[in-house]
Image (cartoon, rainbow, N blue to C red):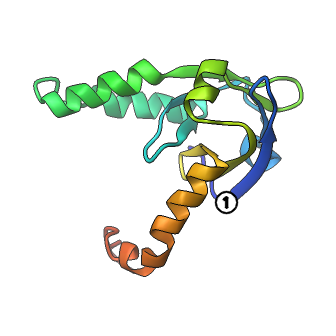
């Protein structure tokens, strides 16, 4: 299971090749990652094992629940394999890069079992909206027993 954290700023080129920091590729560089439509305007990118776990989570959806069914359909319709080239650049299909307004400076945000790819403008707007309520947001997390 991935342990992704931190914020990285990288420039994506006109062919939507995004250089990944070595912190995200690790010592055993994967051949590809898998992406799904993320929340709040980002692209969620998973290594294979974590993507498989996400698919298992989606399999548990109640198909009779229209909201869960819609979410699964939308998520899976957005799924795409993202290969890495020999220079550890994530190769994002042009239609995906355009859909997320990726150009120039791009933000990569570690998010535990995956990392998120944001346009600089979307990331900055999200942070501006949420950073002031950081302490209040912390109270919404589940408590861990034994701490």
Q: Is residue 125 above or below residue 54?
A: below
- With 11 as the anchor, is 33 left or right in this view? left
Q: Position of residue 84 (x, y in %)?
A: 76, 25
Q: Residue placed at 61% from the left, 33% from the top?
A: 47
What secondary structure is marked by label 1?
loop
Instruction: Give the position of the C terminus as an image quadrant.
Output: bottom left
Does residue 88 appear in the picture of this structure?
yes
Q: Position of residue 78 (x, y in %)?
A: 46, 23
Q: Nearer the viewer, residue 18 or 63?
A: 18
Does residue 3 appear in the picture of this structure?
no
> In which quadrant of the rendered view does residue 77 lie?
top left
- With 103 as the anchor, is 127 left or right in this view? left
> In which quadrant of the rendered view does residue 11 lie?
top right
- With 58 as the anchor, is 50 left or right in this view? right
Q: Residue placed at 77% from the left, 43% from the top?
A: 26
Instruction: Give the position of the N terminus as an image quadrant.
Output: top right
Residue named by callout 1: 6
């Amino acid at each position: 299971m991935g342990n992704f954290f931190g914020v990285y700023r990288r420039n994506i080129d006109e062919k939507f090749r995004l250089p990944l920091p070595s912190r995200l590729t690790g010592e055993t560089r994967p051949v590809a990652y898998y992406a799904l439509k993320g929340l709040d305007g980002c692209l969620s990118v998973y290594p294979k094992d974590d993507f498989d776990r996400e698919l298992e989570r989606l399999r548990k959806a109640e198909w009779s629940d229209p909201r869960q069914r819609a979410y699964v359909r939308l998520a899976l319709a957005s799924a795409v394999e993202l290969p890495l080239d020999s220079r550890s650049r994530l190769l994002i299909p042009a239609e995906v890069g355009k859909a997320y307004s990726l150009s120039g400076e791009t933000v990569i945000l570690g998010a535990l079992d995956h990392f998120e790819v944001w346009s600089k403008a979307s990331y900055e707007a999200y942070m501006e909206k949420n950073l002031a309520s950081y302490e209040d947001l912390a109270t919404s997390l589940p408590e861990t027993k034994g701490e």
